[in-house]
Image (cartoon, rainbow, N blue to C red):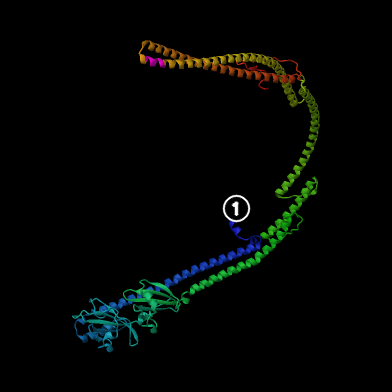
Amino acid sequence: MSSSPLRPLKQLIPSVIRKHYLAKFGLIILVVILATGGAGFYFQQEASAELTTQVHNQMETVASQEGDKLTQWTDEHRQHVRTLSRDSVFGSGDRTEIATTLLFLHEDQPDSVTAIHYVNTNTGEVLESTAKNWKGANINDTLQWRDSPGLEFRFTQSVGSSQVFQSDGVDKMAFTSPTHANTDSRAVVTMVNTAEITESFRNPIEGGYTQVINSQRTIELAKEPEQMLTTYRGATATALIDREKSGVVELAETDEVVAYAPVSGINWVVVTHAPQSNAYTVISAVRSEFLFVIGIALAGFLILSVTIGRNTVRSLNRLETKATALANGNVQTDIEQTDRIDEVGRLTNSFQETQAYLETATKQTDAIATQDFDAPVLDEEVPGTLGDSLDRTRTDLEQSIKALEFARKETETARKEAEEMATALTEQAAAYSETMEQVSDGDMTQRMTVDGREAAMDRIGTEFNEMVDELEKTIGQLQSYVDEVETAGAEVEHSVNTVRTASEQIASSIQKISDDAHNQREQFEHLSETLGEITTEMDSIAAETERSDIKQLSKQLKETESAVTEMIDLSQQTMSEAQTVAGAAQEQAAELNGVAERADDLQRYAEPLRIILEQFETEQQHEFVLSIGSTGSMSPSKLPGADEQ
């Protein structure tokens, strides 16, 4: 059986929960609530992050656009002052004409240009101006030039600008460019009202504002007059000025979202501010809506668990009680029909129908068990395989009863036949037993009678008769063998005694010869020693007298000594050979003694065997041939059936 993939997960759930549907239902609702809450929180965070990114992008875009607008604004005024400085009137040197020309040129300028000055770049003195109060004044006393060294220009095309300043209660900014006069110490300066550009600052978020700060952390441009020319937040300004690209930061100390963007061509940074509460209004609304939706979902799950879950559990508990009783064999359990059309109602009605079918099946089973095949309950229909099984059981039981009755009759007939066969076998076995007892008593003339009624008994009788025939032949042969053994043993014993007597005589004669040879050898050795001494003495005398006859005699004595030595050796050889012959005779006598003992044993064993064989009564004696080989040993000739014996 394959295991469910959820089985490991089920093992993690305590059995107290797995045993109760309501607990499992509540656990599922809790899991769904947690999953819904987790998913809602996740999506709310994702949506918040996305909206936050959109707000940041929007504010960064506004800051970048304001920076581009400022770049365009400064470029336009730089171009205006450059164009003014190129006018030919400045080359005439006629200050009256220059003053008149400045007035005409001022009329053609935008309204934001409040004044045009003609100044000495060396001293900073305003030589001519469209504003009478500026004529003769030193412009360097009021303006702080952005580009060092101020009015000193390296090129005729150069354009300078000042930091924002206040004049006559108005925030202004000056732009300057050198003239093309014969002298290089003259320049044109335009005074521009910054209100035009600050009024154009926009912020898409309510409560937001825009400021422009320089590299010295001074607010040069702002809509609010009180913020102009004040110092921007220290650490924040430094961080923003040091950045080369636009971006967005959140300031926790002011609870603001700040977008910044550098202004090209000038040391300005546009900083757009917005309160986080206003910037993230949409995010707060989305978060609230998410929480509201999640709350509705959670409330729905709780209502579902309280209503459907509890009612379902109550119905299932009642059904469980009925089903348990039914499972315990109480088919009389009362299960009422219900008008519910959902799964629980259909399940209850199914159990009621099952109970009715089981009750009918129980009654039918009781009728079949009591063999009441005509009971009315057997005609009632039980649906499905259970009804089919009961029908087959009833049919099979009826057939089995008939078959058992037929088998009983057959068994009775077979029993009678078996009793008759047993009686016959008992009688035949008694006759066989009597024959076996007679044969075991030695009467080999008895045979079993084979009547052909039982093949197995006939086979036993035939094989027993063949065995008795073989035993009868063997006993006859053994009787002949015993007679031959007694005769042969007596002959062997007589021959052995004769040979033993001769061997003993030979051994005695050889011993005497050996003794004589030993005595003769001792005499020869003594004679050889004596001749040796005489020969030595004769050699000494011959050497002293030098007589030839003595030397001749000594030579003859040595030859005689040599002959005696040869006789000693011959005597020794004769004695050795005599001893060898004596030993052989003794060994032959010992072997003959063994043969005599074995022949005597054979005669002793043959006598009891004869006594035993005389107890058997046979119809004939069988010939037995005893052969004696060249070695004098006896062996029986091959008998019929010898292999079997």
Q: Is residue 492 left or right of residue 217?
A: right
Q: Nearer the viewer, residue 443 or 510?
A: 510
Whether residue 637 is in magenta: the answer is: no
Residue 642, horizontal then vertical, whole percent: 67, 20
Residue 428 drawn above or below residue 381: above
Q: Nearer the viewer, residue 86 or 173?
A: 173
Q: Main secondary structure of the magenta part?
A: helix
Question: Which quarter shows the C terminus?
Answer: top right
**Element under disc 1:** loop
Q: Mark yes or no: residue 6 visible.
A: no
Q: Mark yes or no: residue 519 visible.
A: yes
Residue drawn at x 38%, y 84% is 225
Stretch in magenta: 536-542
- Residue 500 in which image quadrant: top right
- Residue 219 in which image quadrant: bottom left
In this view, the residue farthest toward the top is: 549
Residue 162 drawn above or below residue 319: below
Residue drawn at x 51%, y 69% is 44
In this view, the residue farthest toward the front is: 545
Q: The residue under label 1 is which amino acid type?
A: Ser
Q: Nearer the viewer, residue 336 or 232?
A: 232
Residue 187 drawn above or below residue 627: below
Residue 444, horizontal then vertical, whole percent: 76, 20
Which residue lies under the disc numbered 1? 3
Residue 149, horizontal then vertical, whole percent: 26, 79
Q: Residues within 10 Å of mark 1 (few under 14, many from 20)?
A: few
Residue drawn at x 54%, y 67% is 40
